[in-house]
């Protein structure tokens, strides 16, 4: 994905052209057919609305991103922790993996009723939901990364007299990094979306909450403004992790 | 600095002149021509070493002695257990019960050898996230030497390995031959009396390979470590070795021990000398007999799958 | 090649022909045994630790509740399954098609692909109401949400897979005089197939998410409806019932896709 | 004959439950068909707005939030008309523990009160205003899907509907341990569960609207006279519901639908006074931006055209 | 059936006996010893062929003729443009303007050669989703031959390629040598007068490689296609070729054309014969001169990066 995005300037120009065409079509349809706001507001109206409500939207985006970051961090810790535990104690694999797979086979949104009932509509339920959504992806990509290690490289380290931990630290963790970071990058967008979806089912703030309220107040310009902000926040988060990935993985 | 390096490397490959031992202090044992002197006590002794993986017998009753400072090359058909032998000597696998392993005169388990021989696997196995120096000092780090000290030590050795000025490069910026030299340097820095090199040049093209062979002899002649060297290439085995061990088809044991009585230092042109060709003939005959066996048994096996 | 691999749910990634009957039977038995153990642990833990039914009801209670109204669960299951399948099939097909188009026409790829990326950052639920507005309360509306979640990973992976085609293999085919069409069918798509299936496995889960979320926008039957209803009447037993049903659907669908993958992408198994 | 049936849909405000029993009964017994309507009942859901779906023509009829949401929709220019009001009195109550610190509404000050921001908040604000309390004097929080925080004592006052949450609370706490605050005791009534149609429908298909009302009335009357049968009908649509809860719900809904003006004028009666009071209140507190033409927003002509005998429960 | 195949393959590699042409009908031209006859008109003629990639000149003024039925081997330092030369002859790249290409006596563009020579790239490039037979018939399918017919044709050829009984296997179930034979079979089935083999045995270990060389000679002697064969290995070049072309360092051109006047069929032992060793010496000298050039220039380049 990042490779497709990071292309030379002609590609960027075409990308901008595509975006402009899309916006023009949208604006043209909305204005030309005189669509009411509750069907599809014009982009220009949305941008105006966005600017007018920027304070609220920025607050809400901050709230949602806080949930997403916290849940994302927690999910990464859990996923990495479990993967490392499995790497150090292989017997854990047959205990953890089937359980994790079973839990993951239910779509995350399916858990939202339970999580909301258990953790309330405050920030903690969002964090738990995001962590659940993220941790499994991270666990799998980290495990795949750790398992990808070349047996012969492990033997080489052992022949130098390295311990299991030494092999993990000097060899397996760096080997796992590319896959781990790819998993982390993919999880960013997911974490924001899960936070928003959970907010819509019950929350005290955040973009999902703003969208929910705006729907009830029949303010569709605000609904779309919030969607725009959510999309921008996801892209920024995605870009941030992608940037870190390129910094860390200088050797690939 | 930089252009100087280009002249320095390769130092004497094409000049066919003897290596000047005075150029650097020689830290290894100083035996000048081990095969000419009365044999000292073997550094490594193996007797009746066997190894079975499930139904597959990889080694069976292997016997061999390696003298200190000796350069022994091992050839044999594919799958005859050469790598298995190395894994045992490196301490990575235990031989089957009954096998006797003696290192530096003392009987020992294979696991006791972990960390006591320096082992270089077939592929270079450089870590892409470590630059040249940090790859070279990997073994020192595992031993617990502080990084600064290890780096300083490695930096001093770079020019000899044709890597001066490359210390900050990452493996993906190096050519195949250079990567192999970094891997060799990593093995040399892990200063153990016995070095195991498992087809170190197997992945190189024939010409780079020839250059690396001559350079290895050059370095070895200076440090005089004991080397056990696996190869598929008979020319390589003769060109490098004091002695060539030919292994039988699987289950592997030593079929033939051929002393290579060619004078050192050896010039590249030696490969067309009559003595070389005579040795090659002997070895080829032995190998072909064995590889024919293993080839037919592998076909029979593939068919029966 | 003879014995159908579809019977095995285990993780055996071996080529189909190596799966013998007793092997798959053993896997099935192991699976059932695992499930039985999990059930006993669940039931036992609730009884032993006296967990409040509000947090975790006994498995037997849940199963009994499900058995009391089997039609609701069966109908919901089938309806959600239908939405999932339609979304998955259309998303998968569209995804592969767009992948090929983007691969062939670089300008289109550069113009549209970024928009695809951005579109995936929009939470579905935010415009679910719009989908109902535009497509009504139909099966189609839910399938469209499932489609929306499904096509993108497939496009990305198709593109990735097509990009990994070895130029040397392309040169070989061209030296045989192959046309672009032959190149695509005989080399490029088969090469991309393993990558495509990685995405399809992901898409199997995502299309189910899409179907369930889609059902939150005013529907009468479906596992999503059951979940929502249970949530707002605080009926924890019913929540677990719906969860178990969707777990069954999710795992089953995933297993089927994975089994098809093992059959079709057999050559990738041992690499 | 089927060919003459006119297709139409009714969008509910929530998922199938006894709150909507009359419509399900009418459909099940073929009352809509008898009136020439082929009616589809579409449930609602979170994040779905009935006013919106009716205004765009996605649905013909809607059972929407209440007077407050009708005002808001009209205020935003959505072309919808209310043709009947279901709950004549406020369905929300505020619940606290009898042995807790809250004895009167004045005691709300400084306490944690949870409520929904989907209409119930207006009721709370109205009651507070009548007592001269400012909203910022208490801790008002969005209310969870669950009543657990209240049961566990983490919340002092919780909002409930007579027919749903109040039941859940009662099932988890001793019945006589609760104290309730009712809006009507403070002179406030916010009628809820409004039946709406698009302006175009009201204008172009008045007969359809009347037919719909007639059939719905019959359904509701049947539901009230045979509650068990009505719950059966609802549970056929949503089998996983809890029967006892649904029966309780229907009892409460009957009380709400037949209270106030409806006791004299019948089900779905539009009480112009109550609407006016609510309108003035929303205007005062800025929920709507400008005075609305109430006659245009609430068209009682359809319900009035039906003989009183058919309306009375 | 199965055990019979084990005996049949390898048919004559170790027996050092002449190939019996009577064993199978010979579909190729029947010239018995092309180097002994007066040279016919060349099948392929290249004159002043150059190729530049951006700033890199890969080939410069290359000139060579290939006679029908001839087996020509090409050696040269890494990166000297050997693969580029093949890409041009296979029709995959156009040479720079001014280069002259004549095939079967007619001047042509490179693109005209697409589908007219059979090309085997360095790696086997088998399609993992096709079994042995289906891989072998790939080119026939592209040509439009119905599958059944193509398969029947391939099945008949399997035993000769040592693949009898393996038709249903997939590439990941084959050894390296077998994969290479499948790739060669694919090339043979694409019946064109000129075959280009780009280091077909480069990825094999030395012993398997030796066996494949002898087998290739065997097959070639039966079908007598014209072969242009790239290799890094001088022994291989001499053992196989009627003529060895030594290329210069980049930009590549022909430095030396060495006719190999060793009698055919050649026995494995020939590699230690004096004539062989003499040829090897000549070629090694030429190559070393060139590879030294390219090695130093590549080091200079690496340093300047
Ligand atoms: N860990 C193992 N488990 C099972 N079989 C093994 C294992 N290691 C090696 N073998 C088998 O033992 C035999 C010898 O293998 P080994 O790698 O030592 O051969 P080799 O002589 O190094 O071959 P090559 O020249 O191809 O590198 C082979 O048949 C191999 O399949
Ligand atoms: N498509 C291309 N674009 C740019 N440079 C190229 C291209 N193809 C080849 N080259 C360059 O042309 C030179 C010759 O390449 P070529 O692959 O023909 O060498 P070679 O003799 O086959 O080498 P090797 O023995 O390593 O296979 C190299 O420097 C290579 O980098
Ligand atoms: Mg080996
Ligand atoms: Mg090449």
Image (tube, coloured by chain):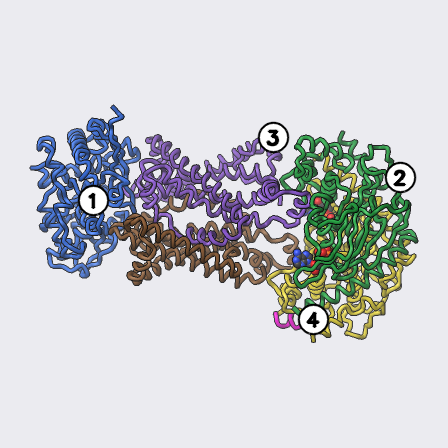
Chain colours: A brown, B yellow, C purple, D blue, E green
Asked whether A11 falls inside the magenta stretch, the response is no
Residue picked out by circle 1: D80
Q: Which residues are magenta?
A: B147-157
Q: CA distance from mark 1 to mark 3?
A: 65 Å
Q: Which mark is residue A182?
A: none
Please rate how many residues cluster around mark 2, counting C-alpha atoms within 10 Å: few if below 14, some from 14 to 19, many from 20.
Answer: few
Q: CA distance from mark 2 to mark 3?
A: 44 Å
Q: Residue at x 65, y 66 (%)?
A: B132
Quarter of the C terminus of chain D within the rendering: top left
Q: CA distance from mark 4 to mark 2?
A: 54 Å
Please say if the residues under marks 1 and 2 sit with CB atoms less than 8 Å apart. Answer: no
Asked whether B149 falls inside the magenta stretch, the response is yes
Foreground mark, 2 or 3, reads 2
Q: Position of residue D122 (x, y in %)?
A: 18, 52
Q: Which secondary structure lies at badge 2?
A: loop
**Horizontally, is E10 left or right of D94 in the view?**
right
Q: Which mark is residue C2?
A: 3
Residue picked out by circle 4: B164
Residue picked out by circle 2: E18
The residue lying toward the viewer, choosing from C99 and E107, is E107
């Amino acid at each position: 994905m990042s490779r497709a995005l990071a292309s030379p300037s002609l590609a960027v120009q075409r990308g901008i052209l595509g975006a402009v065409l899309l916006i023009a079509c949208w604006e043209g349809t909305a204005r030309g057919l005189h669509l009411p706001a509750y069907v599809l507001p014009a982009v220009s109206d949305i941008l105006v609305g966005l600017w007018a409500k920027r304070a609220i939207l920025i607050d809400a985006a901050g709230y949602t991103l806080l949930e997403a970051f916290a849940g994302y961090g927690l999910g990464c810790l859990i996923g990495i922790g479990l993967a490392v535990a499995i790497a150090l104690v292989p017997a854990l694999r047959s205990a953890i993996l089937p359980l994790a797979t079973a839990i993951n086979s239910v779509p995350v949104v399916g858990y939202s009723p339970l999580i909301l009932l258990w953790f309330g509509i405050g920030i903690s339920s969002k964090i738990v939901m995001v962590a659940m959504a993220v941790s499994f992806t991270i666990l799998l990509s980290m495990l795949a990364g750790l398992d990808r290690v070349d047996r012969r490289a492990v033997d080489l380290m052992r022949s130098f007299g390295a311990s299991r931990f030494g092999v993990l630290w000097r060899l397996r963790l760096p080997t796992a990094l590319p896959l781990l970071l790819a998993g982390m990058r993919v999880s960013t967008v997911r974490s924001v979306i899960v936070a928003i979806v959970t907010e819509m089912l019950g929350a005290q703030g955040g973009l999902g909450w703003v969208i929910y309220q705006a729907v009830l107040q029949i303010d569709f310009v605000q609904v779309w403004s919030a969607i725009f902000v959510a999309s921008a926040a996801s892209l920024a988060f995605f870009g941030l992790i992608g940037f870190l990935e390129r910094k860390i993985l200088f050797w690939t | 600095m930089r252009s100087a390096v280009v002249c320095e490397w390769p130092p004497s490959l094409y000049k066919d002149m003897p290596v000047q031992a005075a150029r650097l202090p020689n830290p290894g044992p100083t035996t000048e021509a081990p095969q000419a002197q009365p044999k000292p006590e073997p550094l490594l002794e193996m007797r009746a070493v066997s190894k079975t993986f499930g139904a597959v017998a990889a080694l069976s009753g292997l016997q061999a002695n390696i003298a200190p400072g000796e350069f022994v090359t091992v050839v044999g058909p594919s799958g005859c257990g050469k790598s298995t032998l190395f894994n045992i000597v490196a301490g990575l696998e235990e031989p089957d019960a009954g096998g006797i392993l003696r290192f530096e005169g003392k009987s020992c388990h294979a696991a006791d050898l972990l960390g006591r021989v320096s082992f270089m696997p077939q592929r270079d196995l450089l870590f892409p996230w470590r630059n040249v120096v940090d790859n070279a000092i990997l073994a020192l780090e595992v031993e617990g030497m502080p990084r600064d000290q290890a780096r300083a030590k490695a930096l001093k050795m770079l020019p000899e390995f044709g890597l001066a000025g490359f210390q900050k490069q990452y493996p993906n910026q190096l050519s195949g031959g250079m990567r192999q030299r970094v891997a060799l340097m990593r093995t040399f820095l892990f200063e153990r009396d016995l070095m195991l090199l498992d087809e170190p040049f197997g992945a190189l093209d024939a010409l780079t390979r020839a250059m690396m062979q001559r350079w290895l002899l050059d370095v070895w002649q200076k440090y005089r470590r004991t080397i056990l060297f696996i190869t598929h290439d008979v020319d390589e085995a003769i060109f490098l070795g004091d002695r060539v061990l030919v292994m039988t088809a699987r289950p592997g044991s030593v079929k033939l021990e051929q002393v290579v009585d060619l004078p050192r230092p050896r010039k590249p042109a030696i490969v067309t000398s009559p003595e070389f060709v005579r040795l090659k003939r002997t070895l080829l005959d032995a190998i072909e007999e064995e590889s024919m066996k293993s080839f037919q048994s592998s076909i029979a096996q593939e068919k029966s799958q | 090649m003879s014995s159908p691999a579809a019977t095995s749910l285990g993780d055996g990634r071996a080529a189909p022909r190596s799966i013998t009957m007793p092997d798959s039977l053993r896997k099935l038995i192991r699976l059932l045994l695992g499930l039985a153990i999990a059930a006993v642990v669940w039931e036992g833990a609730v009884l032993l630790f006296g967990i409040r039914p509000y947090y975790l009801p006994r498995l037997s209670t849940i199963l009994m509740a499900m058995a009391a109204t089997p039609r609701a669960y069966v109908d919901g299951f089938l309806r959600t399954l239908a939405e999932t399948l339609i979304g998955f099939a259309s998303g998968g097909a569209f995804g592969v098609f767009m992948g090929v188009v983007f691969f062939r026409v670089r300008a289109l790829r550069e113009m549209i692909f970024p928009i695809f990326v951005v579109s995936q950052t929009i939470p579905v639920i935010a415009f679910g109401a719009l989908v109902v507005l535009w497509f009504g309360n139909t099966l189609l509306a839910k399938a469209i949400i499932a489609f929306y979640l499904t096509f993108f990973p497939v496009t990305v992976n198709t593109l990735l897979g097509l990009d990994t085609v070895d130029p040397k293999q392309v040169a070989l085919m061209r030296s045989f005089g192959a046309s672009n069409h032959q190149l695509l069918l005989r080399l490029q798509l088969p090469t991309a197939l393993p990558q495509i299936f990685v995405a399809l496995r992901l898409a199997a889960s995502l299309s189910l998410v899409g179907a369930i979320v889609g059902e939150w926008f005013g529907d009468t039957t479906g596992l999503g409806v059951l979940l929502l209803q249970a949530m707002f009447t605080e009926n924890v037993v019913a929540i677990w019932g719906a969860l178990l049903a969707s777990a069954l659907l999710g795992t089953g669908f995933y297993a089927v896709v994975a089994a098809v993958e093992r059959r079709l992408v057999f050559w990738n198994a041992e690499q | 004959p089927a060919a003459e049936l006119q297709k139409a849909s009714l969008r509910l405000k929530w998922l199938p439950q006894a709150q909507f029993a009359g419509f399900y009964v009418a459909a099940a017994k073929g009352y809509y068909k008898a009136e020439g309507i082929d009616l589809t009942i579409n449930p609602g859901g979170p994040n779905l707005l009935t006013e919106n779906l009716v205004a765009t023509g996605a649905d013909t009829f809607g059972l929407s939030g209440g007077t407050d949401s009708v005002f808001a929709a009209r205020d935003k220019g959505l072309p919808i008309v209310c043709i009947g009001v279901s709950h004549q009195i406020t369905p929300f109550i505020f619940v606290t523990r009898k042995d807790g610190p809250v004895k009167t509404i004045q005691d709300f000050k400084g306490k944690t009160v949870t409520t929904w921001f989907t209409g119930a908040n207006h009721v709370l604000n109205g009651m507070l205003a009548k007592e001269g309390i400012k909203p910022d004097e208490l801790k008002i929080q969005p209310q969870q899907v669950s009543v657990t925080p209240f049961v566990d004592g983490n919340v002092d006052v919780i909002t409930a509907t007579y027919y749903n949450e109040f039941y859940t609370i009662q099932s988890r706490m001793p019945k006589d341990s609760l104290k309730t605050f009712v809006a009507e005791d403070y002179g406030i009534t916010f009628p809820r569960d409004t039946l709406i149609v698009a302006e175009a429908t009201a204008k172009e298909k008045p007969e359809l609207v009347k037919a719909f009302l007639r059939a719905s009335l019959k359904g509701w009357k049947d539901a009230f006279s045979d509650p068990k049968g009505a719950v059966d009908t609802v549970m056929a649509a949503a089998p996983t519901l809890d029967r006892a809860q649904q029966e309780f719900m229907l009892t409460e809904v009957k009380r709400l639908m037949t209270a106030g003006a409806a006791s004299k004028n019948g089900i779905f009666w539009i009480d112009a006074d109550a609407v006016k009071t609510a309108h003035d209140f929303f205007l005062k507190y800025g929920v709507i931006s400008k005075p609305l033409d109430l006659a245009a927003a609430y068209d009682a002509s359809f319900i009035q055209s039906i003989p009183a005998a058919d309306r009375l429960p």
